[in-house]
Image: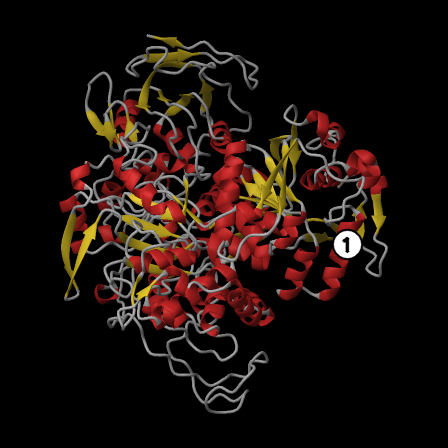
Amino acid sequence: LGYAFEYLIETLNDSSRKKFFNVPRLGGTKYDVLPYSIRVLLEAAVRNCDGFLMKEQDVMNILDWKTKQRNVEVPFFPARVLLQDFTGIPALVDFAAMREAVKTLGGDPKKVHPARPTDLTVDHSLQIDFSKCAIQNAPNPGGGELQKAGKLSPLKAQPKKVPCRGQTACRGSCDSGEPGRSSGKFSSQIENTPILCPFHLQPVPEPETVLKNQEVEFGRNRERLQFFKWSSRVFKNVAVIPPGTGMAHQVNLEYLSRVVFEEKDLLFPDSVVGTDSHITMVNGLGILGWGVGGIETEAVMLGLPVSLTLPEVVGCELTGSSNPFVTSIDVVLGITKHLRQVGVAGKFVEFFGSGVSQLSIVDRTTIANMCPEYGATLSFFPVDNVTLEHLEHTGFDKAKLELMETYLKAVKLFRNDQKNSGEPEYSQVIQISLNSIVPSVSGPKRPQDRVAVADMKRDFQACLNEKAGFLATTFVGFKGFQIAAEKQNDTVCIHYEGSEYRLCHGSVVIAAVISCTNNCNPSVMLTAGLLAKKAVDAGLRVNPYIRTSLSPGSGMVTHYLSSSGVLPYLSKLGFEIVGYGCSTCVGNTAPLSEAVLNAIKQGDLVTCGVLSGNRHFEGRLCDCVRANYLASPPLVVAYAIAGTVNIDFQTEPLGTDTTGRNIYLRDVWPSREEVHQMEEERVILPMFKTLKEKIEMGNKRWNSLEAPDSVLFPWDLKSTYIRCPSFFDKLTKEPVAIQPIENAHALLYLGDCVTTDHISPAGSIARSSSAAKYLTHRGLTPREFNSYGARRGNDAVMTRGTFANIKLFNKFIGKPAPKTVHFPSGQTLDVFEAAELYQKEGVPLIILAGKKYGSGNSRDWAAKGPYLLGVKAVLAESYEKIHKDHLIGIGIAPLQFLPGENADSLGLSGRETFSLTFPEELSPGVTLNIKVS
């Protein structure tokens, strides 16, 4: 490490005698004006400078950031890697396939290991099979026998207390028996899963839902889980966090984050990259991290750096403090809108100013988690006193905290509010006053379309009137639904559970408190819980046809909602815990009732979904729910009670109490003082500590899961989940020359804003899709299909799922559909079938596209899938950087039209043939000539 800069190694001036690179000595005043995030890059460069992968010139370029930003590319060695199961399984499957390839080429497969610490959390496989409405007819996608489930009532009575088992954290009596004496066992407990109170081991209300969903999760994903367990056994540096524990970013924040790394008595800043754009959450804790592509992640796991253009750093000065009715999500959306207007795409954002100290760590991590939505690479909050206080409250050892503070101050990575001559200088400085931020929601189609709650009714009515526009994916406007004026007041009567209700435009049919963005924030979740309590006490309720759910980011959320006494009130309003993991957020929502679906279709209604997530697209929650809004958890509860988004909370009541008195939102909204008092009392050290212990212990199902421990993975030829991919079949010791593309056809002709979700969907597998046909041929029923995300370890399914999104708009077809036209035959086929036919004919393929091709979540199969379809190049106006890197990594040429040109301006119909030859020495930005005929 740091061969060229060994002279900078010093011993920390404290009792620990730990070593560190004193990087400030290298740059003097140059170092003092560097942004904190760039200082982290510089330290990693100095520490890893070996003259080969990291050269001295790279170090000097980072030190000279002020003049070199945007102009040079530098390597970065992150300290660790974070994977989640959807994107992690293809990486580990590739590692298993690498072992096969190494053996085939005469090498030792035992040498194939990740070189960097790699953590994988199983959090994306959860689907909501069971809820209070669905559990009567419980599906069993995993096969085998399941216990018959009874009907879950909207609100169960408080469960019986279970005798305390001697928990040292227990602070009171547990009904009968003395602390430490057990007089019985809780028979339905899944051992060590975070659904019990850590002090009294009381089951939370509605545990059946959690248990049933976890049971199906293990049954449905057994093959994948066995593969993960094999990986954790045979690969060094791989640790797997089992299902039912929590979301990747939440576990990363609460458990995996170190802030300061220690390796062989050497201290250095924690940093992380991973396969999800929302890994940026940890930047709120002062840990540099961002999402990269799956292929780049595998390179980092093998000890290679990620490469990035030395970024611009936008300094965001926060001033003032927010008003009592503003939640963290309001702050997030306010900052999101401001930063989008400024334009921070591809840049680092670093926060400073007096307002930063007004934000708790959960507020900061919420803001940092949303940075992909305003286009920044990351949003960094340097470590300060607030950070240390948070770490102390969550159980960090005091000696470690003192060591952390001493080290960070020694290398000038510790922020304070006192201005001095060594203040960082930024590429650009913007100011945001927290006082100016008002409560808001985001939608109805895009997360960047923010609407003040006070303007919600007027805005929704405008959306009904607004004419439809044109996008690449479908014929819709950015906000408009083009409903005729005479149809805007239409209502449809439905009968549900013995009562009559009326649906209209704006009716809420899905309400989900979901996603790590909000569930990690105690104040926001407690606000929702207190609002629910006050609403129930006032006699308000949620209409039963609304599909409601509560999916906590981790067991800690369940603990404090339960111990604070608000969970039963959320449950009574229908917000029951359905499991721990990504469900509604990634499209795994429970289906709407037939009565609601029929009413929507009958009246052509613009119904709404309201969720506390961080991203939405039209049709992602449900194909027939056309308007979807992001909102804070308390507003999700409020809109669910109101039953419509077409409401002015200032002048219209949520409902009436038992005496007929109008109840307004202001009557049930808890004060900031109430929330803070409850947060202080309930979100305390034992909860964090207990959760960490549970993660380390695993759970009964995971611990009893059998898995092989062989050097090579024993591939099951009958498996529909795990297959040895074909990427390495033609691997040679020497790379082959790049081949020209001759007489290629366009497989698809796409427009703007084609996301990775359009290219490689993560949701359910449609029964009519090519992937469904493959699985049916293998003997599976539709109940056993699972989702594309769960089958990313099977290249046959993923190739067939490429471009299978029902919202994909292909200009060859003229409407949203996962189909294309084969040339020259003119047949309309599924995209996979057309590609298969082209491959039989020996015809290479390209894709024509517009602006922002590959935007959205990082998804390596959005490059791998087209590659296996035979796509050799994509010709687009612009690309999302991560996806472009994926295309390069897999061997698809990302070609870009010259400025001001596109397929339309050049008169291309897409029916032509395309030929091009690559120069022997490829370089970024080289101009190529494409022959079209």
Q: Viewed as shown, does residue 122 lie left or right of 660?
A: right
Which color scheme did the rendering employ for the protein? secondary structure
Q: Position of residue 775 (x, y in %)?
A: 26, 45
Q: Nearer the viewer, residue 509 or 874?
A: 509
Task: Describe the element under mark 1 as helix, strand or loop.
Answer: loop
Q: Answer few, some or many: residues within 10 Å of disc 1's Cα (few below 14, many 20 plus, some between 14 and 19).
A: few
Q: Look at 44% across and 55% down and name the residue there.
A: 123
Whether 547 is drawn above or below 559: the answer is: above
Whether 355 is drawn above or below 346: the answer is: below
Q: Viewed as shown, does residue 414 lie left or right of 628?
A: right
Q: Look at 77% across and 52% down and name the residue there.
A: 407
* Residue on which disc 1 sits: 265
Residue 211 shows in the view: no
Quadrant housing residue 657: bottom left
Q: Mark 1 belongs to which amino acid?
A: Asp
Whether 334 is drawn above or below 933: the answer is: below
Q: Position of residue 364 (x, y in %)?
A: 58, 51
Whether 535 is drawn above or below 278: the answer is: below
